[in-house]
């Protein structure tokens, strides 16, 4: 059974702190790993990672994938209250004509002023 | 204006009702998806359509019936639902399968 596990499930920090969110996976036919930020309702796309060891950056957010150890991390530096959200990790699988995307349960990040 | 819209945003229905959720994307994408997000559970993929053809039905009960009349519109027809079907239903689209998905705002469904 394909599994995506995120840790921690929740995290409370103060503004200015740096946080690291983890996502590990056990899947067959890995294709890519995606990070989303979910505030209120709709998840918004952050990163798609397909290659090991290549860091992707967007402002204060960065992410990297380790395909040997089967995990990814999402770093947020100098956190702000606006970073408070659920961060979702998802793994995309390939396999014939089927399409599969499996999500983790998410990490609830709360940034206090 | 968001590229993916969903209506209604909130819906309350009885177990004997029939209702439909609508999703529309203005991004020129070819793939569309329905997801279910229940409390304390991971986001679950329900259906996938690529160029109007259903490519995935992730073991979803038949009381959920998708329809994709064209690449821009996706419906989820609901009938004889159960209280455990109460959840947030999210629609997403992507340029093609395996490409970045963009989500709509979701429909919060409550089944009484």
Image (cartoon, helix red, strand yellow):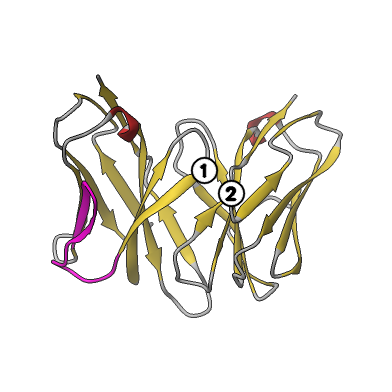
On the image, the x and y values in percent for residue B66 come to 73, 58
Residue B3 is left or right of residue B62, and the answer is left
SS at badge 2: loop
Q: Which residues are magenta?
A: A49-65
Q: Is residue A40 above or below residue A88?
A: above
Q: Is residue A37 magenta?
A: no
Q: Tell me if label 2 and label 1 are in contact, CB under 8 Å.
A: yes
Please tell me if label 2 and label 1 are on a single chain: no
Residue under the point 86% across and 35% down = B17
> Is A62 covered by the magenta stretch?
yes
Quadrant assignment for the C terminus of chain B: top right
Most foreground residue, A17 or B81: A17
Q: Secondary structure at mark 1?
A: loop
Q: Tell me, for residue A42, which label it has, or none.
A: 1
Which residue, given by chain and number where applicable, does mark 2 sit on?
A: B104
Q: Position of residue A66 (x, y in %)?
A: 16, 62
Q: Quadrant of residue B16?
A: top right
Task: Let me know if residue A28 appears in the view.
Answer: no
């Amino acid at each position: 059974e394909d599994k995506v596990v995120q840790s921690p499930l929740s995290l409370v920090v103060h503004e200015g702190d740096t946080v690291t969110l983890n996502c590990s996976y056990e899947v067959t036919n890995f294709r890519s790993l995606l990070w989303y930020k979910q505030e209120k309702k709709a998840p918004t796309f952050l990163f798609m990672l397909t290659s090991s060891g290549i860091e992707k950056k967007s402002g204060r957010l960065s992410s990297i994938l380790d395909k040997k150890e089967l995990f990814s991390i999402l770093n947020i530096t100098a956190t702000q209250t606006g970073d408070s959200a659920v961060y979702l990790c998802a793994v995309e699988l390939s396999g014939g004509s089927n399409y599969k995307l499996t999500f983790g349960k998410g990490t609830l990040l709360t940034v206090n002023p | 204006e968001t590229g993916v819209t969903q209506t209604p945003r909130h819906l309350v229905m009885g177990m004997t009702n029939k209702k439909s959720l609508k999703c529309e994307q203005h991004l020129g994408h070819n793939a569309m998806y329905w997801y279910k997000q229940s409390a304390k559970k991971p986001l679950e993929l329900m259906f996938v359509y690529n160029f109007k053809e259903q490519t995935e039905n992730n073991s979803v009960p038949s009381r959920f019936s998708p329809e994709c009349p064209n690449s821009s519109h996706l419906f989820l027809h609901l009938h004889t639902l159960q209280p455990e079907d109460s959840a947030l239903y999210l629609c997403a689209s992507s340029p093609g399968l395996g490409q970045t998905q963009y989500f709509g705002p979701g429909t919060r469904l409550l089944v009484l």
